[in-house]
Image (spheres, rainbow, N blue to C red):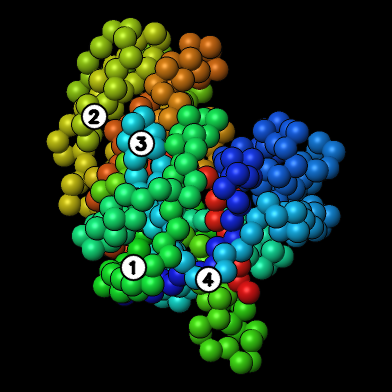
């Protein structure tokens, strides 16, 4: 059962939130962060990407950069740009994109739940990335950025969300990217108790986005427990920062592929080979969007094509085999193009659906890429089924949008 607790959040005063809040550390590079933070000393980028306070080209993994992150976090608290709440609370964080709002509950999630598999993952993590995130948690003694969880729909928690969000939000603003962010503090003791009780009836939480941050936060908490001879299990380091969304609130968007060459084939030869496993239809010059599961959009030589996988080329009883990313990776990228490792092959690149299918067309028309492949999005049901069966999704399968805004809430391990 999911064990969560309220906590004393560290967060900006209302009048500071738009200056402090930032995009997550991993969706932009150092130069982009430097540009976004220019002229704003209270931007969270000074804490989560502190290399921006050094000359361009400074190694972001150097000791002086980590030290600067600690110095800046302390300065933010000293200046009153981040202030810790006086009591334990839960929080509700909602995001609006294209007129659609999703509501999450901000909790302190349990380290043992992660270590023992009650917080389920669907992606592999890399040890080097885990270690980098672990350093940040260790040096700050805090979870500066939240992780993004999903949970099976729960009517009691939905009712709490509806009741709390009927009141005035603590924060309510639109970020420069056009996404709305809304935030409420749950102060009522009975409601806090009801949230804890409702989560205790939920068997599993699911990592939607932030596998490396989840692993790092849990591993640091586990490390602190091992090093504390008086460890009891209720210390703050036994928990880490998460925003938990009902599964039905979330929408996974497409994660598409662009490929540099046709592996020595002509366009005509490539299309002929595709006919073996797909029903291929020329859709003309207008952008074509995949219509359903097992239907793909191919852009090649100025034309869009509908590719529908033929019966027998996939296994809908296999959680991995039924995925369109598996079908396309095996039958197109591996068998026809010779790409076997999506993580390392330089002939392929990946484009999040937030950029639109026009971006795929642009990259092919520019001559940079030979063709583009658009996929129908994975569903939350598929993601949870893969996690439940102990499987791991292929690389570059899911893209969640909007991303959680960083800087709205921080969890101290003290």
Task: Identify which residue, 180 or 298, lies in the foreground.
Answer: 180
Specify which label sits upstream in the sequence, 3 or 4.
Answer: 4
Percent coordinates x, y for residue 281 in the rendering: 22, 15
| Relative to 177, residue 115 above or below | below
Which secondary structure lies at badge 1? Answer: helix
Binning the other alpha carbons within 10 Å of mark 4 as few (below 14), some (14 to 19) or many (20 upward) gives few
Percent coordinates x, y for residue 160 in the rendering: 29, 60
Whether residue 254 can be seen here: no
| Relative to 32, residue 356 above or below | above
Report the disc number at residue 253. 3
Report the disc number at residue 295. 2
Check the image and name the residue furthest to the bottom: 230
Report the disc number at residue 87. 4
Task: Identify which residue, 233 or 377, lies in the foreground.
Answer: 233
Mark 2 or 4, closer to the camera: 4
Percent coordinates x, y for residue 355 in the rendering: 45, 26
Tell me which residue sits at (38%, 72%) in the image: 189
């Amino acid at each position: 059962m999911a064990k969560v607790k309220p906590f004393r959040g560290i967060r900006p005063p209302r009048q500071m939130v738009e200056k402090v809040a930032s995009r997550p550390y991993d969706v932009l590079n150092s130069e982009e962060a430097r540009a976004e933070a220019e002229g704003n000393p209270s931007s969270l980028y000074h804490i989560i990407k502190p290399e921006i306070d050094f000359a361009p080209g400074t190694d972001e993994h150097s000791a002086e950069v980590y030290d600067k992150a600690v110095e800046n976090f302390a300065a933010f608290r000293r200046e009153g740009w981040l202030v810790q709440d006086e009591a334990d609370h839960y929080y509700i964080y909602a995001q609006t994109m294209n007129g659609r709002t999703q509501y999450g509950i901000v909790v302190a999630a349990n380290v043992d739940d992660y270590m023992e598999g009650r917080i389920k993952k669907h992606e592999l993590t890399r040890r080097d990335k885990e270690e980098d995130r672990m350093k940040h948690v260790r040096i700050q003694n805090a979870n500066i950025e939240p992780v993004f969880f999903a949970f099976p729909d729960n009517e009691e928690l939905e009712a709490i969300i509806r009741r709390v969000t009927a009141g005035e939000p603590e924060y309510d603003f639109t970020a420069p990217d056009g996404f709305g962010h809304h935030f409420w503090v749950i102060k009522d003791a009975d409601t806090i108790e009801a949230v804890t009780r409702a989560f205790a009836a939920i068997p599993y939480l699911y990592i939607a986005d932030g596998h490396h941050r989840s692993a790092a936060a849990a591993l640091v908490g586990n490390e602190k427990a091992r090093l504390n001879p008086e460890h009891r299990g209720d210390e703050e380091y036994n928990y880490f920062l998460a925003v938990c969304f009902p599964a039905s609130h979330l929408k996974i968007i497409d994660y598409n592929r662009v490929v540099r060459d046709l592996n020595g084939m002509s366009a005509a030869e490539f299309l002929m080979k595709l006919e073996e496993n797909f029903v291929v239809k020329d859709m003309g010059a207008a952008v074509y969007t995949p219509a359903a599961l097992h239907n793909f959009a191919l852009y090649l030589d100025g034309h869009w094509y509908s590719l529908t996988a033929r019966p027998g080329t996939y296994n809908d009883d296999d959680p991995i085999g039924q995925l369109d990313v598996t079908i396309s990776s095996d039958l197109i990228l591996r068998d026809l193009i010779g790409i076997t490792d999506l993580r390392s092959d330089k002939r392929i690149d990946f484009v999040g659906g937030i950029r639109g299918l026009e971006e795929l067309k642009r990259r092919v028309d520019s001559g940079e890429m030979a063709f583009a492949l658009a996929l129908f999005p994975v569903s939350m049901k598929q993601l949870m089924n893969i996690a439940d069966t102990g499987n791991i999704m292929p690389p570059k399968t899911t893209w969640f949008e909007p991303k959680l805004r960083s800087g709205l809430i921080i969890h101290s391990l003290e």
